[in-house]
Amino acid sequence: MEKAEHLRYACTFAPQGWSAADWIGVGSPRWAWRGTWVQEADHIRNQVPAGAGEDELLGPRAPETYASQVWQEQVNLPLRVCAELCFDHRMAPLIVLAPELGADCNSRPQYREHYEVVLYDEGINVWYHAMALGRPRWQKLIHHPLSLAPRQRHLLEVETREAALVVRVAGAEWSVPCPELPPRSFVGLTGCEGVNRFYNFSIHTSA
């Protein structure tokens, strides 16, 4: 960012480093499943079905691995969000930006339009999600190839600039055109398609 930054929110995901009350659990319109988080000694991870193999978590049981939450306040853009995270097998922890939240048939928060910056063993994918005729639709905006090791902590950083998302990880940086970025957004984390671990999170805005 060119302007001075203000630290809007920061936490670690150790037991005393964060409060679940500061976050909103959000479901995906693709699945009825509502995932939960498991608290570990220095991080949280998405709950996955007991006894399922890694290939199952990537395939037929992937919906049962999904857990997502956003910080409770909408944040003005431009912003920069940082998260230290890892995956046990191949994928796919991510940072999510959601302009507005909808609701499912039980009035629980559910994503509508949102952006996902997804880290996995072969690099970064950036996805744009929206609803069309009442059904979820998604489009891959970019794939940036990198070799990212499992069970290793990676610092993922996403910054909004004029009509673009700037993504940084493992010493690499690139810009993704996003002409429809909103003026405000919820920001958070999602774990899916395997065991994903999250160690810390921060949001920085222009002062």
Image (cartoon, rainbow, N blue to C red):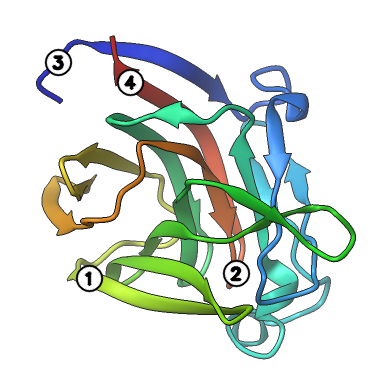
| 112 or 196, nearer to the observer | 112
Label 2: how many Cα within 10 Å (few below 14, some 14–19, many 20+): many
Q: Earlier in the sequence, mark 2 or mark 3?
A: 3
Q: Earlier in the sequence, mark 3 or mark 1?
A: 3
Q: Which mark is residue 202?
A: none
Q: Identify the image quadrant of the N terminus.
A: top left
Q: Give the foreground label among 2 and 4.
A: 4
The percent position of residue 77, horizontal first and vertical second, equals: 32, 31
**Depicted 5 relative to depicted 38: above or below:** above
- Residue 40 in sight from this viewpoint: no
Q: Which mark is residue 3?
A: 3
Mark 1–mark 4 distance (CA, rounded to whole Å): 25 Å
Q: Give the foreground label among 3 and 1.
A: 3
Q: Quadrant of residue 58?
A: bottom right
| 9 or 11, nearer to the observer | 9
Label 1: how many Cα within 10 Å (few below 14, some 14–19, many 20+): some
Mark 2–mark 3 distance (CA, rounded to whole Å): 38 Å
Q: Give the foreground label among 2 and 3.
A: 3
Q: Which mark is residue 205?
A: 4
The amino acid marked with disc number 3 is Lys
The amino acid marked with disc number 4 is Thr
Mark 2–mark 1 distance (CA, rounded to whole Å): 22 Å
**Depicted 57 relative to depicted 29: above or below:** below
Which residue is under mark 1?
A: 142
The amino acid marked with disc number 1 is Ile
Query: Helix, strand, or loop for circle 4?
Result: strand
- Residue 102 in sight from this viewpoint: yes
Label 4: how many Cα within 10 Å (few below 14, some 14–19, many 20+): many
Check whether the beta carbons of the residues at disc 2 and disc 1 lie within 8 A of each other.
no
The percent position of residue 198, horizontal first and vertical second, equals: 55, 42
What residue is shown at x 85% (from left), y 66% (from top)?
A: 105
